[in-house]
Image: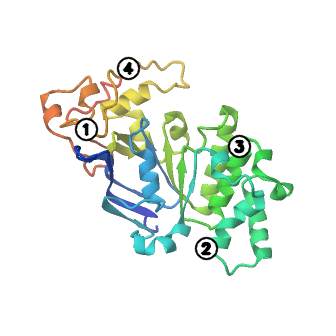
Amino acid sequence: MSGPVVTARNLSRHYESGGGMFKERQVVRALSEASFSIQPGKTLAVVGESGCGKSTLARLITLIEEPTAGDFTINGVEAVPENWDSLRSQVQIVFQDPYGSLNLRHRVGAIIEEPLKIKRPDISAADRADKAREMMAMVGLRPEHYDRFPHMFSGGQRQRIAIARALILEPKLLVLDEPVSALDLSIQSQVLNLLLDLQERMDLAYLFISHDLSVVRHVADDVVVMYLGRPVERGSKEAVFSAPRHPYTVALLSATPSADPARVRKRIKLEGELPSPLAIPDGCPFAPRCWKAQDRCRKERPLLDDADHAAACFYPESPEDNG
């Protein structure tokens, strides 16, 4: 078995905000201490509320921004700014909004071929066109679509164009940032099944970012749950969904519809608002909203250990608690 496609260790990204003549600049801790690895052909899903650091993590892994602390490797090569250019062909991204991520003035063929023009200038125009048409067929687009413009397609078809563009360089890792949340429900399953088929055919590793746990259940192998910029639970999909350990994960799952009519799950409504990343509480950041919080939680921050199924919680849930 080959090694992991990507390995991240304590990745963090902080931003300075505000400041002025009489004010100090504040630090926004958008992402802190994220560690994980993804094997070829596997999917790691990152889930959590808006503002939890999911998209910040995507920008780091796709070499758009440099981490404030921590490091990561792509195919065993450390990703530092000096070698970003050589690594970018190995990691590509599919964005949430396919309409916004495509150049509306370019034809579909030109959009799909553009990465080849930039990264593989030695390939002839005829070979680029042949490769683009081959990739179009692989994602379910017809030959006559090659000369059409993006506005002539449905949302699902535009996302297929975006996927074809991302795969034209044959990357090892695909970052999927909410890839189906902008699509109609009937189209979501088609695109998800396409992604799973492509993963099997090309042995791709996926970093799948989503807030929709029903989608994550369908595609993921492993899951990382984020809260306020930090991973709070990590484990296999089966472990996280069947026996969640962190109270925040339990609350998220309680809000997810179940296809089993015989299963009764108590709905947990979190009290209070998500704290500001400019003023993260001392101790456990989830303590102000947690029904299990005790004095220790408000003074000391629990850490995520290296266990196969780990939770950053002093009083994790048990199977009995989950019913």
Q: Earlier in the sequence, mark 3 or mark 2?
A: 2
Residue beneath disc 3: 156
Q: Which residue is mark 4?
A: 269
Of the image marks 3 and 1, the number of the one nearer the N terminus: 3
Q: SS class of the residue under badge 2?
A: helix
Mark 3–mark 2 Cα distance, whole angstroms, equals 27 Å
The tag earlier along the polypeptide, 2 or 4, is: 2
Q: Secondary structure at mark 3?
A: helix
Secondary structure beneath dot 4 equals: loop
Residue 222 seen from this side: no
Could you tell which of marks 4 and 1 lies nearer the N-terminus?
Answer: 4
| 155 left or right of 80 in image | right
Q: Residues within 10 Å of mark 4 (few under 14, many from 20)?
A: few
Extreme-right residue of the structure: 144
- Residue 296 spot, x, y in % from top left: 13, 32
Q: CA distance from mark 4 to mark 1?
A: 21 Å
Labelled pair 3, 2 in contact (Cβ < 8 Å): no
**Neighbours of disc 1 within 10 Å: few (<14), some (14-19), many (20+):** some
- Could you tell me the amino acid type at mark 2? Lys
**Three-letter amino acid code at disc 3?**
Gly
- Return the residue at label 1: 280
Q: Is residue 82 visible?
A: yes
In the figure, is residue 164 to the left or right of 39?
Answer: right
